[in-house]
Image (tube, rainbow, N blue to C red):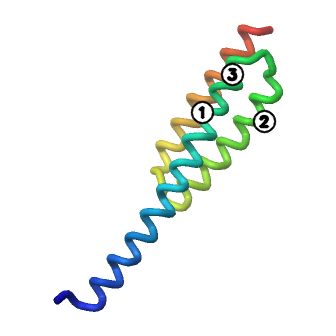
């Protein structure tokens, strides 16, 4: 028989796991939609999409779902790709 505090920590970890999973899923789908937008010829929509993705990444980093340097690295790489695609289309 385990201690009540250990049982509570286990319950809490299960809740956190589900919350983190949903955050990661949100991030993944947002990044995916941005990358799909980069393929189109509409740079304005891709720019607004990048803004939304960067907000999501920053919030996820502040909630410790992902590391803050990972969020920064992803934002930098995505903005670099956006700049490259807009330069190519212009």
Check disc 1 and report its element: helix, strand or loop.
helix
Q: Residue at coordinates 71% horizontally, 25% vertically from top-left?
A: 37
Q: Earlier in the sequence, mark 1 or mark 3?
A: 1
Q: Earlier in the sequence, mark 2 or mark 3?
A: 3
Q: Residues within 10 Å of mark 1 (few under 14, many from 20)?
A: few
For residue 45, which quarter of the picture?
top right
User: In x, y percent, where is residue 18?
Assistant: 47, 63
Q: Earlier in the sequence, mark 1 or mark 2?
A: 1
User: In x, y percent, where is residue 17?
Assistant: 42, 63
* Residue placed under numbered mark 3 in the picture: 38
Q: Quadrant of the N terminus?
A: bottom left
Q: Which mark is residue 48?
A: 2
For residue 32, which quarter of the picture?
top right
- Disc 1 from disc 2: Cα separation: 14 Å
> In the picture shown, does residue 12 fall above or below 55?
below
> In the picture shown, does residue 37 fall above or below 90?
below
Q: Residues within 10 Å of mark 3 (few under 14, many from 20)?
A: many
Q: Quadrant of the C terminus?
A: top right
- Disc 2 from disc 3: Cα separation: 11 Å
Check disc 2 and report its element: helix, strand or loop.
helix
Between 90 and 11, the residue placed more toward the observer is 11
User: In x, y percent, where is residue 5?
Assistant: 30, 88
Toward the left, the furthest residue is: 1
Q: Which mark is residue 32?
A: 1
């Amino acid at each position: 028989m385990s201690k009540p505090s250990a049982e509570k920590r286990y319950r809490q970890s299960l809740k956190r796991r589900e919350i983190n999973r949903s955050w990661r899923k949100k991030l993944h789908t947002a990044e995916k939609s941005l990358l799909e937008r980069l393929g189109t010829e509409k740079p304005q929509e891709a720019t607004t999409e990048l803004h939304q993705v960067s907000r999501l990444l920053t919030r996820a980093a502040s909630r410790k779902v992902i590391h803050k340097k990972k969020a920064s690295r992803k934002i930098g790489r995505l903005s670099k790709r956006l700049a490259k695609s807009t330069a190519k289309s212009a």
